């Protein structure tokens, strides 16, 4: 007889609804922040990590996600040299000017400009006249706060050039260093560079001068110390001990040795799925714990060896361990939910407990992911206009054979725990990401929360029956118009 048989079924994110809370006047979408503090030394603007998967996270994904405020985790499957090279490139990434900004003409409608915002994911669109003379800036946040109709000319929704909020300089030859200084001194988020006739030349953005963050995965196998040392020296912001099952002596040994090495970089360990596993790691000093097993989009772990747990149940149990540990020790341990999060609604439910989410499938679908891009005929293509799908594969697949993540010392014991496949291509990351972040902010606003800390403290979530799930989960009882 098994020691314990749990008959309550495991749960996933989409089975829950987030209930509404009291939304205050100062609690609208634009008042909400998604910043998350993972440790005293690591705060992210967005609670998002891209999975340490060779088909997902390389230089391009780390850069694109890092620019938006998330964190790419470079897979341990890469060689130390490959990881370090990317970390250096990310840390050395220098702001450049946007020399051909997307603009709109003064006589465009608000609706037309909103389409550009949606298509390119830029929240600021310079408005120019027919001679490219700068007349003002359309700023999404400002638009939310004013009362204009979609068919109104954008001039009525922009912040006109000449007002204090517009930060501009008439020096087309301005250097990056000068722009940096100017941005710092006038505390603006952007700088519009004009020529002497006020024609738009280029733009510079504050967020491009902040250092982009990057993380690197290690395993518990020989060579991890050298990997850590090289990455830390290159300036990595987070080390992730990436194992499929972290409730083990091996992970704790690494954690202890890591602390002895006196490394300044925060360490995340995972993955665990049980109360006991999480409590064990926390008691042994874990700063950040990663949660999840068997729920990844490419994962066949449960099919092959029955291990794993439904992701929301795993998170709830680990969340309980975190609460109990906090009560006893006074130490708050951050949680990262990893695997099975596919959309903004999943993220929202996960963030009622977790401090951040890690995703593979979600990021795999974008231009910046590391997977090959295929055209409609299934041929590899580099032509952005032809891209229709993206190749994905798990770290436990034959293709990646990340032996150490799954505890295999030699190839002889290896068996597949992941598959290779494709996911639909969605274009560049930024527009979809911005849109999804907006949805998360809207949910927080509905729940009466201004930030993720308040969400974790005050969220009320409710499980649906399968019948209720059908009614609340999506539109129903109608013939659906094509959504694509
Ligand atoms: P996704 O967001 O649902 O695609 O899940 C991503 C997560 O799946 C990763 O961060 C890993 O924790 C996990 N994972 C990656 N590769 C494999 C595999 O081959 N087998 C099982 N799990 C995997």
Image: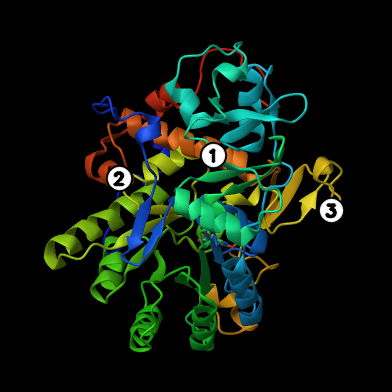
The first of marks 2 and 3 along the sequence is: 2
Establish if 208 lies above or below 430: below
Residue tagged 3: 380
Going by the image, does 140 lie left or right of 102?
left
Whether residue 15 is visible here, answered yes or no, is: yes
Whether residue 50 is visible here, answered yes or no, is: no
Q: Residue at x 45, y 41 (%)?
A: 346
Ligand 1 positioned in quadrant: bottom right
Q: Quadrant of residue 199?
A: top right
Instruction: Report the Cα–Cα distance between label 3 and label 1.
Output: 28 Å
Q: Residue at x 27, y 61 (%)?
A: 275
Tell me the element at label 2.
loop
Q: Quadrant of residue 194?
A: top right
Q: How many marks?
A: 3
Residue 338 spot, x, y in % from top left:
46, 56
The first of marks 3 and 1 along the sequence is: 3
The first of marks 1 and 2 along the sequence is: 2
Q: Nearer the viewer, residue 302 or 29?
A: 29
Residue 160 spot, x, y in % from top left:
55, 26
Residue tagged 1: 434
Q: Are marks 3 and 1 in contact (CB under 8 Å)?
A: no
Instruction: Report the Cα–Cα distance between label 2 and label 3.
Output: 45 Å
Mark 3, mark 1: which one is toward the viewer?
A: 1
Tell me the element at label 3.
loop
Instruction: Report the Cα–Cα distance between label 1 and label 2.
Output: 37 Å
Tell me the element at label 1.
helix
Color encoding of the figure = rainbow
**Does label 1 point to a residue whose CB lies under 8 Å from ligand 1?**
no
Residue tagged 2: 8
Q: Nearer the viewer, residue 177 or 324?
A: 177
Going by the image, does 10 lie left or right of 371?
left
């Amino acid at each position: 007889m098994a020691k314990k048989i749990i008959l309550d079924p495991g749960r996933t994110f989409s089975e829950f609804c987030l209930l509404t809370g009291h939304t205050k006047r100062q609690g609208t979408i634009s008042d909400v922040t998604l910043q998350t503090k993972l440790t005293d030394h690591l705060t992210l603007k967005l609670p998002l990590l891209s999975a340490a998967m060779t088909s997902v996270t390389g230089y391009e994904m780390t850069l694109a996600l890092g620019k938006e405020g998330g964190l790419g985790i470079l897979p341990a499957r890469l060689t130390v040299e490959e990881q370090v090279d990317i970390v250096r490139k990310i840390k050395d990434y220098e702001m450049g000017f946007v020399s051909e900004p997307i603009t709109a003409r003064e006589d465009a409608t608000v609706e037309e400009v909103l389409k550009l915002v949606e298509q390119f994911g830029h929240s600021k669109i310079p408005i120019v006249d027919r001679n490219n003379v700068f007349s003002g800036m359309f700023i999404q946040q400002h638009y939310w706060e004013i009362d204009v109709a979609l068919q109104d000319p954008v001039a009525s929704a922009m912040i006109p050039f000449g007002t204090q909020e517009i930060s501009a300089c008439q020096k087309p030859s301005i250097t990056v260093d000068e722009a940096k200084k100017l941005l710092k001194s006038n505390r603006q988020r952007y700088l519009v560079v004009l020529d002497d006739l006020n024609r738009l030349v280029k733009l510079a953005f504050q967020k491009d001068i902040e250092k982009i963050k990057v993380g690197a995965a290690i395993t518990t196998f020989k060579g991890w110390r050298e990997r850590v040392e090289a990455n830390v020296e290159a300036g990595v912001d987070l080390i992730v001990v990436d194992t499929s099952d972290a409730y083990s002596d091996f992970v704790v040994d690494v954690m202890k040795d890591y602390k002895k090495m006196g490394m300044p970089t925060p360490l995340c360990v995972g993955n665990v799925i049980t109360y006991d596993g999480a409590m064990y790691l926390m008691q042994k000093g874990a700063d950040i714990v990663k949660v999840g097993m068997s729920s990844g989009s490419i994962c066949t772990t449960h099919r092959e060896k029955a291990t794993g747990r439904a992701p929301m149940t795993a998170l709830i149990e680990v969340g309980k361990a975190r609460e109990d540990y906090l009560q006893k020790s006074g130490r708050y341990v951050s949680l990262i939910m990893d695997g099975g999060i596919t959309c903004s609604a999943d993220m929202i439910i996960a963030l009622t407990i977790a401090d951040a989410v890690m995703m593979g499938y979600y990021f795999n679908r974008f231009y910046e992911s590391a997977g090959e891009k295929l055209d409609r005929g299934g041929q590899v293509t580099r032509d952005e206009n032809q891209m229709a799908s993206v190749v994905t594969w798990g770290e436990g697949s034959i293709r990646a054979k990340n032996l150490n993540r799954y505890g295999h010392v030699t190839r002889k014991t290896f068996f597949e725990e992941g598959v290779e496949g494709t996911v639909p291509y969605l274009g560049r990351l930024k527009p979809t990401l911005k849109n999804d972040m907006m949805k998360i902010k809207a949910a927080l606003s509905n729940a009466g929360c201004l930030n993720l800390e308040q969400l974790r403290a005050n969220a009320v979530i409710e499980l649906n029956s399968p019948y209720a799930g059908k009614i609340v989960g999506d539109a129903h009882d109608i013939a659906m118009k094509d959504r694509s």
